[in-house]
Image: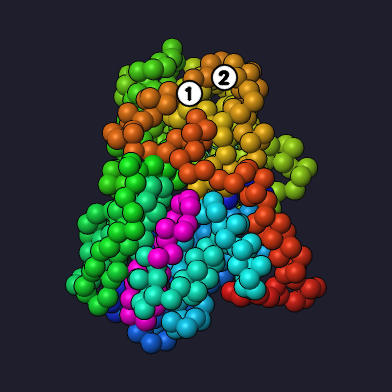
Amino acid sequence: MSEPRHWREECGVVGIAGVQGAAELASMALHALQHRGQESAGITVSDGHLITTHKAMGLVADVFDETTVKSLPGTFAIGHVRYSTSGSSNLINAQPIQVASHRGAISLAHNGNLVNAPQLRRTMEQEGSIFSTTSDSEVILHLLARDRAESIPDALQNVLPRLDGAYSLVLLSGDTLIAARDPLGFRPLCLGRFQDSYVVASESCAFDIIGARYLREVEAGEIVVIGRGELASRRIARAERERRCVFEHVYFSRPDSTIFGTSVERTRRRSGEILGREAPADADLVTAVPDSSNTAALGYARATGIPFEMALIRNHYIGRTFISPAQQVRDMSVRIKFNPVAEVLTGRRVVVVDDSIVRGTTMRKLVKLLRQAGAEQVHLRIASPPITNPCFYGIDTPVRKELIASSHTVEEIAAYLRVDSLCYLSLAGLLEATGEGERYCNACFTGDYPVPFESEPDKAVFDRHAAGAELILKPKPGGSPGGPGA
Ligand code: AMP
């Protein structure tokens, strides 16, 4: 389906160390992280000497069938799922990125966004470096290859302080798995115990599927080096306070996950409860926009005493169904995903809880559907504050002017959405829901950016590269796109 372009760089990473059938375990873990990225999937395995990467565009199930997984023997593995805009150019940016260097083969998978990658890349290109992807992650590999330290962990310790922004990364070389998080800890990365060894993953739900036990978060500013059964930890830097992405709790992560050492279910449910206290409504039922707002809606229902009902049914099987522009005008892009339950809605005053409003286009269509299905009143409650600023730390938001709340008041948004009332959760309420509000980044709601960046338009440096790649990679009629990872 041609989805409206929201944000681009959600990703999920996993690392398995010293376990038989590492590729199979990594592919299972990637299934659990599929919600973090549906554009491409990839796994690198190592048997201690030989490193092999398989990656392609598509869902984990499409990229890794039984034959493919069996063709990847090894006891160490890293994996990645990526969400990005559609188009063949993304094939070159599928991860893990495997390179050959004077240290041997290295493979890297990264979740986050480096705000100084354009400058670093520009300098290296001027010095003669040739990049084969348009991704900021490749900059890390170049810096690693250039560093003169003896070992990869030593080199990483030199390189990471040169990076500004967000990185939760896994790196594989020979029989060493390395996991690291930036000093502010924007993106999550969990450490788990599996058999006699260790695993890492963006969210703990990836551990549940393989039967690993959650131990702790890889700490902000920590490098964890895992060999065959042993783990060593070192630090790059300790920031005064972490700035974890609060939107991970609002939308990205699964409620059955622990991230940043906190249950997503707990945070989301609390956010709904606080929203219920802050903005009750006179209504007959509370409903969610499944699945991301289910938990917050349950919290809202509990706090207000209004019964929770399933008034919207989501179709999980639409994938990337093509919707023609003419059909989009008839709202089919939303209708194919959500169908209202007339039996529940007819003649009722409905509170709809959603996790966030980005551009407002989805909600405008949903409200229309709910009314057509018989809802008498629609009161909208959003379990996060208005999104007024783009993110530069791993969620490539639409440009500022496309964020509806960047230029419209709550009253104007309510009028545009044609709802009877609209209330957002306060920032204080959201931060309270996390239990450790001062440790979270809230730049998308406040513009308070914890890591400065050169300038907003500089993001275009990579976009320009990506546009160029699109041209180069456009498949010839009957041919297939080329480039690394093809
Ligand atoms: P919009 O139509 O642009 O306002 O989209 C709002 C919807 O997008 C909400 O229902 C959210 O659940 C969902 N959403 C929020 N953040 C993201 C994201 N990063 N990627 C995809 N969907 C999102």
- In the image, 478: left or right of 363? right
* Magenta residues (range): 158-178
Where is residue 253? Give x, y as percent.
Answer: 40, 47
Question: Going from the N terminus, do you reach mark 1 or mark 2 first?
Answer: 2
Residue matched to label 1: 424
Tell me where residue 276 sits by quadrant: top left
Q: What whole-number distance in Å separates the C-alpha atoms at marks 1 and 2?
A: 8 Å
* Colouring rule applied to residues: rainbow
Residue matched to label 2: 410
In the image, is residue 238 above or below residue 354?
below
> Which residue sits at x=49%, y=75%?
145
> Which residue sits at x=55%, y=54%?
116
Q: Amino acid at mark 2?
A: Val
From the viewer's side, name the closer residue of 34 and 51: 51
Does the magenta run of residues contain 167? yes
Q: Does residue 434 appear in this view?
A: no
